Image: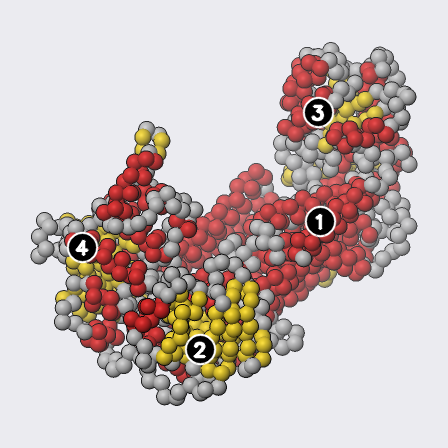
Amino acid sequence: MKRLLSVILVCVMLLSLAACGSGNKPGPSQSSTPSASQSAEPTKPANEKKPVIGVAIFDYSNNYVTYIRNSIMSVGGDKADIQMVDAQNDQAKQVEQIDILLSKGVDVLCVNAVDPKAASTIISKAKAADVPIIFFNRSPSKEDMLSYDKCWYVGTTPEDSGRMQAEMAMEAFKNDSKFDKNGDGVLQYVILKGTLGHPDAEARTNAVQETFANAGFKTELLDVQPGDFKTQTAKDVTDVWMGKFGDKIEMILSNNDAMLLGAIEAAKAEGYFSGDASKVMGAIGINALPEILPAIKDGTIIGSILSDAYSEGLNIFTMAYNVATGKDVYEGVEIKPDDMKAIRVPYIPISKDNVNVAEEMYAKALNK
Amino acid sequence: MNNPETYLLEMNGICKSFPGVKALDGVDLKIRPYSVHALVGENGAGKSTLMKCLFGIYEEDAGEVIFNGQRVHFSNPRQALDYGVSMVHQELNQVQDRSVMENIWLGRFPMKGIIVDSRKMYNDTKKIFEDLSINLDPEAIIGTLSVSQRQMVEIAKAVSCHAKIIVFDEPTSSLTEVEVRHLFRIINKLRDDGCGIIYISHKLEEILEIADEVTVLRDGKWVYTGKCEGLTIDKLITLIVGRELNNRFPPKRIQPSEEVILRVENLSGEYMPTVVDASFELRKGEILGVAGLMGSRRTETVETLFGIRKRKGGNIKLNDKKIENNNARESKSNGFALLTEERRQTGIFPTLDITFNSMIANIDKYTNKLGVLNEKKIAEDTKWVIDALSVKTPGCKAKIQNLSGGNQQKVIMGRWLLTEPTIMLLDEPTRGVDVGAKYDIYQLIIECAEKGNAIIFISSEMPELLGISDRIMVMSNGRVAGIVDAKTTTQEELLRLASKYL
Amino acid sequence: MKTFISPSKLLKQHSIKDVIINNAIYIVLFFLFLTIVLIDPSFLSLKNAGFILSQSATRMIFACAIAGPIVLGGTDLSAGRLIGMAGLITASLLQSPDYTARVFPNLPRLPIWIPILLAMIICALFSLIHGFLVAKQKVAPFIASLGMQLVVYGLMSVYFDAVSDSAPIGVLDEKFTGFAQNGITILGFRLQYIILYAVVVVALVWFIWNKTKLGKNMFAIGGNIEAANVSGVNIVFNMLAIYVMAGLLYGFGGALEVARTGSATNALGQGYELDAIAACVVGGVSMRGGIGTIKGIITGVLLFQVISYGLVFIQVNPYLVYFVKGAIILIAVVIDTKKYIKKK
């Protein structure tokens, strides 16, 4: 009886899993692990040989990378056999997954490395199997990139997002005197930093400060605290700021939008961001997530910096498809490669006037 | 140096205080070589504390320890062992899943380079066993051995360290008559080899039999040291308790009626070792003693009856009505109560207070429909337990683990008395309990029977079985070997029955 | 020669030592608190007290919830993920009706109690399964809850991915965020409603622990499961009840957490169980089971929150915050062990 009950329990849980996983979505539900696709392969029509593209993702639960993988699927799902794997933020696991993909004979590898330092290992594996490789989102070193001729990179320039955030802050501060609450002509601001030691967090935080300095813009940085890129942590940190600095803060610059959401929630309890004209506080995020767009639209916050996941996904797939089908790798790619064979997709500052750009990007990325 | 007239170990003027208590107050203990020295006293008299001071578990506040003519101070049991002072514990601390020899040589394995020399370890163990005429396989796993055998291993361990002083703490509390004989032969052998033996026990008959000298402690103070020759049990009891105890067993004024209250027919348990095909009956107001050797499965019998072991077959009839007793809850509602043998394992909730330990079995009676407890009633009942059983405790909020063994046992007795049981199953209720507390417990058992309830009373101590039972059921190897009248039977008859099915 | 020490002096020495050992954690925390105040005296304000309390609110609920399984002698590593699942469910069902990109665009505006109740029931179900594995199947709680943690995380991630394409679920119904964040301000001290809910939950758990049969049975099982069995305690039923209670509280607390912070992802709740366990341990709940008080747990939560708020307030190196928290936990465990050894 006991045993029967537990068996039933397990069955119910598995069933519910299967039910959740089989929703027909363009995204990861169609992507398949190497082992699963092996069994699925015979059911495909064999008349047309599609190129096989292996995609190694560093962590499925990463929000931004999810948009990239969705874009890759929506752009190329019909044209190629895309085999996508999730390393769950574990570099050792990713190396094993790449071994599996290579042994299955993929035509090209797209790798979102867990640790960019491991790129040389991945490159030597691909080199040995003579498989071209396209890195994306997390950049290997220039040295590694140049060590293999069939290796390219698609990504962004992380400093750019910080620079654009600072530029947006300066513009808002100069154009709208309400942000200079104490009227001293100096911007008093705080930075919500991502996880300590994370390359993006460091790059964005430094870029913001450098941009201000280079522009000769007078600022006072009240505090920098890590919010781990998480809403909940950022909310707790902002609570402390509200208690410590209160109305002194003229602007919050956040390394990403998820943290900004938490900061807004904390500041709301103090009356900010809720339409009260006497309670002013500027806020700028990075990512321009769909959740933050309404706040930009109605003027609650100044803006955010859109990372163009769709363009990244499009370029990744285009280049992968090109090399797999023997065409020139850059065919149809509008952005010029730099000296380390990297395609740098530009960020787009999103403010009240161009929210539609972000909305269109998401529509394309999700193929809606 | 081995002159029997000099002392091997002297503890002089030992004092030790705990917050609020003076546990030891100038206690002396002097042990000669070639002798067995009994250390007796009620629970809480300071025997354990004295030993803990000797082994460095506690630091004495004042006093000195002289071993082999030298002033010594051990900072831990290991250091004491290196000097040749060793202890065979009441609760055996052994590594259950490892072999006998590994347990003996643990911490000082014979080495051959970096490899443990198993062959030497085996041979050395074997030799010690032969010297002590212990019949055990050095490679046997400790967990598979009986308490008696495990105790032998501990003794062998002491001998392997060339111990000069060996302390035995309640060594016979879990042993049968036959095993006690074997133990005494070993102790005598150790004595003849020149060891000084400290023998701690509540069993006065044994002490008079084995010991050469005796030291009595009472309330943390030294009371008496002298030769055992010429001492009587009554005199010893007077020394221990500090007053005269005329009778070791309280009188029973009312005889059991002929009315049968519980009938057990062909009771068998499911998983071995267990009770096999036991049939007996219990009358109103009766105390049925249960005798048997270790491993005669008396515990299994009452636990099967109470439903905490699975029953395979047989009927239980309470007042001629068939009952099931499938689990403790059901048995409880049928008016059964079980005082288990392993007080620590299955009796007390060590970290919780007296109140909690008193009320837990009776919790349903304090609960209203919403599951909320009536604290006033609980407090009253706890007070009753403390008063009626004369539990020595600072108060009802004291944690039970801070009480002495006898007082813990009284609390658990009280716990079950609160459920107002009609059938009480008592499994070794006086084990590890001092003389004074024992008398209280006998009194409770008898009072309970006099109220018309029935009691099954398991004990390994013949005198108390004969002293308070009406009839005695003897078990042998899981079967009922016979039921005899306690007034007319003899120890010889009980022993003969106990080995009937071996 | 040893000098003779009078017994009374001895007694005194012992008691001072005992007092220090028994209160060492509070002493350490007091000095930390003092350091914070000395570095920045403005830390002592009603406003900060209000923030600390509102940040502690959900954490108190989580700690009270997880303390049940711990007192039973187990642990619950699945707590954080269950909290996250509850947050995700309520967030996805309670987005602002004005927001066009809702995950369920056609969902009518629900009364807030429906999703909260739903989250509580779902969490209770998972905890029931967990309890069943531990109580009936005798799976070690550590392993059972580790398994449950992964199962729950997997399921919630699949749900998250399915409904919102792994984008944070935000822009919540103001009724819902207001349910937690609104409050009354008295002389600069802001009493958010969330604090009141926490007080109610704590009072309820205190009542169950101290005044009901379930509570007594919980301590009995944690203190000595064999003795509890012999005493006629229905082990399986009581353990299940405690686990279900924990699940209900994870669900309620998870909903409050998301209402407090305004958005949810599948990372919500990650590591919360460790914070809760740490608060319990610092508050004197023994990981061996059978020991613990609500008073201690609440103290543990508050002290942790004062420290983590205070360390951010005085802007110490964020890496150092980990060090301080870790050290506090270790001290607490050492003291717990010390108390235990003394009793032997």
Residue A92: percent from left, percent from top = 63, 28
Residue at image mark 3: A100
Residue at image mark 4: B191
Residue at image mark 1: A10
> In the rendered image of this protein, does residue B351 appear above or below residue B411?
above
Residue at image mark 2: B455
For residue B495, which quarter of the picture? Answer: bottom left
Q: What element carries label 4?
A: helix
Cβ atoms at labels 3 and 1 below 8 Å apart: no
Amino acid carrying mark 3 in the image? Ile
Q: Is mark 1 on a helix, strand or loop?
A: helix
Chain hosting mark 2: B
Chain hosting mark 1: A
In the image shown, does C25 or A63 lie closer to the viewer?
A: A63
Amino acid carrying mark 2 in the image? Ile
Residue C70 visible in rendering: yes
Amino acid carrying mark 4 in the image? Arg
Residue B460: percent from left, percent from top = 35, 68
